[in-house]
Amino acid sequence: MGHFFSRRAVLSTAATAVAGAGMTIPSFDDRTRHRKLQTGIQVLMADDYELVRGQKVGIVTNPTGILPDLRHVVDVMAASDKIDLTAVFGPEHGFRGAAQAGGSEGFYVDEQTGLPVYDTYQSSGQALAAIFTRSDVDTIMFDIQDAGARFYTYIWTLFDSMQAAALAGKRFVVLDRPNPITGRRAYGPIMTPQFSTFVGREAISQAHGMTVGELAKLFDAEFLDGQVGPTVVEMRGWQRDQAYEDSGLPWVLPSPNMPTVDTAFVYPGTGMFEGTNLSEGRGTTRPFELIGAPYVDHRWADALNELELPGARFRLAYFTPTFSKHVNTLCGGVQLYVTDREAFDPVKTGIAMLVTARRVYPGGFAWRYDAYDPARPYWIDKLTGSTQVRTDIDAGKDADEVERGWAGPLQEFSRKRRQHLIYRGGN
């Protein structure tokens, strides 16, 4: 406990020194009082952390765990004498975001705060529970900005953390944040048990249309037998149809290949190209908006624009990825532009792109095949949740026919989803 107060004294002294040097540091309220929306952490702070008073707290977070003034919540809480923050848990890419896709930062002591940072990436169940136990915290908090897609792994970090907290006997608190692609509705196919992986643990839709707080409620009720009982610190002032740009919140890259809100809008659809031999734009400045391969030419953009997909247009584009697929090789392809977010269906658009690419380039297009997993070798099946999308496309079905293949399961998921929604608007 002595370290806890001495560290805060150092941080407080540093802030005083900056002010003494002639710099005025505006208060948190001064910088944010004009903003209507308050995230979960802002609500918790406004209540002087009463919810976790007297408890040792650990937080699962990453660079997106910020306040509207760009201060990180860990830095702010570490300097406060109103909350006993004693540990940080880093997911994929790490707490400070130093690792690329599929990587993490390992265990270390954070230089800025002096807090221990535990690596939780690829840990689940009893292994993750052991990490929580070793940290000696009473309460696990979660504060990460999601991107809105099932195969964006932070929601499964949430799921795994909830399950491990229950195993370790820890309280679990979710500090809610907006769904950046709105929460109007759910889109796309549903995960099936035989294809469960870290890009999809449980039966939710490909674009879930929920906040992390709502997902926590759904996970607990539908998949964790109510063992967690998570506390959700709800946002104030958010509605389901609100554009992220209207929230007053800055966009922080939740991962290296999610640079903008525009990326998040297309990702539930174009993320499926990870399951093909086309580049999904990694290694460019527009990942998931630029899609292509060395064998692609102008015919793909022409064919896609002829479809007149709602809210979408395609530009012929050439690019050379600096890493990942087709590294240092010129690729032809398209850049996807969302012209009307309300009309745009990311999953159906992605399916139409897959269908058209396979039709236009029958000798070039191929599904990614992973020999290390002979029982489930096609990555597209893990992304979409079953063999249905791949086999329908291979059978020559168009996008509407492929979409009808998941209509029933999506309707059932949407019914369950509605039971766990917190905020108004959408359906």
Image (spheres, grey):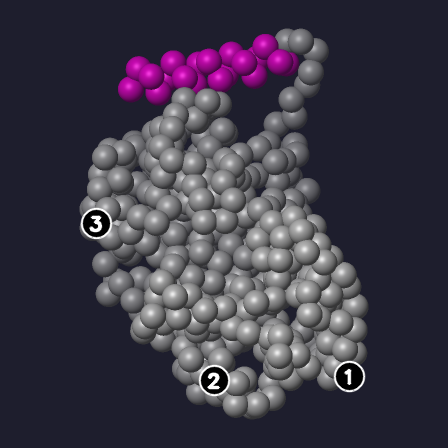
Looking at the figure, which quarter contains the N terminus? top left
- Checking the image for residue 306, the label placed there is 1
Of the pair 4 and 287, the residue shown nearer to us: 287
Mark positioned earlier in the residue sequence (1 or 2): 1
User: Residue 338 falls in which quadrant of the image?
Assistant: bottom right
Compared to 126, does 77 lie above or below?
above
Q: Amino acid at mark 3?
A: Gln
425 in the magenta segment: no
Q: Which residue is mark 2?
A: 391
The residues bearing labels 1 and 2 have C-alpha atoms spaced at a distance of 24 Å
**Which of label 1 and label 2 is nearer to you?**
2
The residues bearing labels 1 and 3 have C-alpha atoms spaced at a distance of 52 Å
The segment highlighted magenta reads 1-19
Circles 1 and 3, Cβ within 8 Å, touching? The answer is: no
Residue at the image point whose x is 53% and y is 34% from the top:
72
**Relative to residue 82, is residue 134 drawn left or right?**
left
The residues bearing labels 3 and 2 have C-alpha atoms spaced at a distance of 37 Å
Q: Which residue is mark 3?
A: 126
**Is residue 100 something that shows in the picture?**
yes
Q: Amino acid at mark 1?
A: Glu
> What crowding class fits label 3: few (fewer than 14 Cα within 10 Å), some (14-19), or many (20 or more)?
some
**Which of label 3 and label 2 is nearer to you?**
2
Residue at the image point whose x is 65% and y is 44% from the top:
250
Q: Residue furthest front?
A: 363
User: Dot 2: what SS?
Assistant: helix
Q: Main secondary structure of the magenta part?
A: helix
Of the pair 348 and 331, the residue shown nearer to us: 331
User: Dot 1: what SS?
Assistant: helix
Residue at the image point whose x is 73% and y is 76% from the top:
300
Compared to 16, does 243 lie above or below?
below
User: Residue 332 falls in which quadrant of the image?
Assistant: bottom right
Where residue 83 appears, x then y in whole percent? 38, 30
